[in-house]
Image (spheres, grey):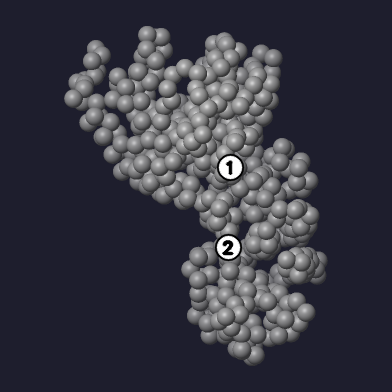
Amino acid sequence: MATYPTAGFSQIPLESHRERLLKKIRDENDLPTLGVAIAKVVEITSSGEDSVSRLAHFVLSDVGLTQKILRLANTVQYRTAAGAAVTTISRSIFLLGFNTVKTSALAMLLVDFFKDQAQAISVRKELIHSLCASIIGREIAQRGRFQDGEEAAVASLFKNVGKVLIASFDHGLFSRIQNVAATGETSEDAASVLLLGCSFERFGELALQGWKIPDAIIQAMAPLPSGELRKSTQRNEWLKQVASFSDALAGILISGVGDKSARYEKLLKRFGKVLELDQAMLDDLLLKVEAETRQMAKSMDIALPETGQEAPDLLKAQGVPSEFLLKTTDVTPAQEAIRYPSGKPHNARDLLLTGVQDVTQMLTSDDYKLNDLILLVLETLYTSMGFRFATVCLRDVSSGRYVARLAVGEHYAERQKNFFFGAKSESDLFALALNNNADVMISDAMVPKIRSLLPVWHQELLPDARSFIILPLVIQKKPLGLFYADRATTADEGVPPDETALIKTLKSQLLAAMMRG
């Protein structure tokens, strides 16, 4: 069994030391939660019909993550394209792209967990490296010859996770490895093997295996043979090449030392043919990646220095890097708006109007899906009006029931599963709304007259609902379903005529799309 051969180090078996460090990571109170969250996001793929709603649900379940995705969608680069403030995760996914939001969410989960560690400077530098690599990986995947290459961005993000973990959980060891490599007598990988017993990459693989990350992503983190690479027809090998290139390019880009032009040239010679890159394409890639890394870092409250003639690098390597100081951004997410006691935002009208504009833009797109449009309308109502739970029910012809198809908000999965009712009733509030195509807006559900009209299933499923809305979806006098949303508080402020008109507009837009589809 190998031991530390370097003077000044205790003779600790490397395998034992490595296993103790992995156990420390596995036993960390919050890390299992982080691992589960990361595995959940990785699991969400664009192949399933409900992938957008699943990703939106995941993001919406975390207020901090929701705010960061909205900040990213509202940065200059993306907001210019949208033309107006982005207030919903559904719109963010449509605007930024599913894979961009997925990879961004992964990066934000990592940063949120590790950025407040005691070794802040080293940890955050490695996190920015990972973040930058993920953006490079996504760009390469979009230009690549393999379809569904979104795993490349995820693999690129995790390629550096071993360094992040070591810097976080054994900063002394991390510093010793860096110091040995800095002498120039050995490479960083060799120093890691010498002092840890394996490379940073291998340590990252072992950690990700513990998080149940898919094998395809873990295998993409494996090292490549030295020298100029050959173009591969195997997708897994291509993923490995993209992850290695992205990690290496990010390392050069964020570095403030050395002859970068020579290093870029060497990297291009090694990867140019296999990734179909030339010098001009690399130059364009560098400009885009640096700009987007800044936008992403800003959305995560990590301020980077402005570039200039004297500071052309993404990160500076001098003194205590001020670029890692936390800084709040200018964007104020909808979740932080001033609210009535019911939870409804004071600027509900503005948020509804933005939602109407978002739906209009989606309707003019050639590639929108009806399910995504329904989710956008649902989330707009949920966010703009400050509801705690919202769902859309559609009629199931085979069972003769109205069944919740999509839901957002508190305990959405459990409530969606049990939110269904028969289509034959004519006396309760839901049946009256559907049969008369009447929009119902209840500010106090405890009023005896209202309470007497609530069906038993509603009182059992949502006994604490104090204010709610019912918006029937009726086409040519045939009820198709309804929107329902509620709060656990009364809404004494009510719904003024301008907000009511915008809510009706949202419903009309959706009905028009359903008629076309």
Residue 31 visible in the displayed image: no
Q: Callout 2 environment at 10 Å: few (<14), some (14 to 19), or many (20+)?
A: many
The quarter of the picture where residue 343 lies is bottom right
Q: Mark 1 or mark 2, which has the lower sequence index? A: 1
Query: Residue 304 or 347: which is nearer the viewer?
Result: 304
Q: Secondary structure at mark 1?
A: loop
The quarter of the picture where residue 312 lies is top right
Question: Residue 461: horizontal and vertical position, in percent?
Answer: 51, 77
> 199 above or below 393?
above
Q: Which mark is residue 147?
A: 1
Q: Which residue is mark 2?
A: 408
In this view, the residue farthest toward the front is 233
Q: Residue at x 58, y 69 (%)?
A: 405
> 367 above or below 317?
below
Query: Residue 229 or 61: which is nearer the viewer?
Result: 229
Question: Residue 433: horizontal and vertical position, in percent?
Answer: 69, 82
Q: Looking at the rendering, in which quadrant would you find the N terminus?
A: top left
Kindly identify the amino acid type of the residue bearing the numbered disc 1. Answer: Gln
> 203 above or below 56?
above
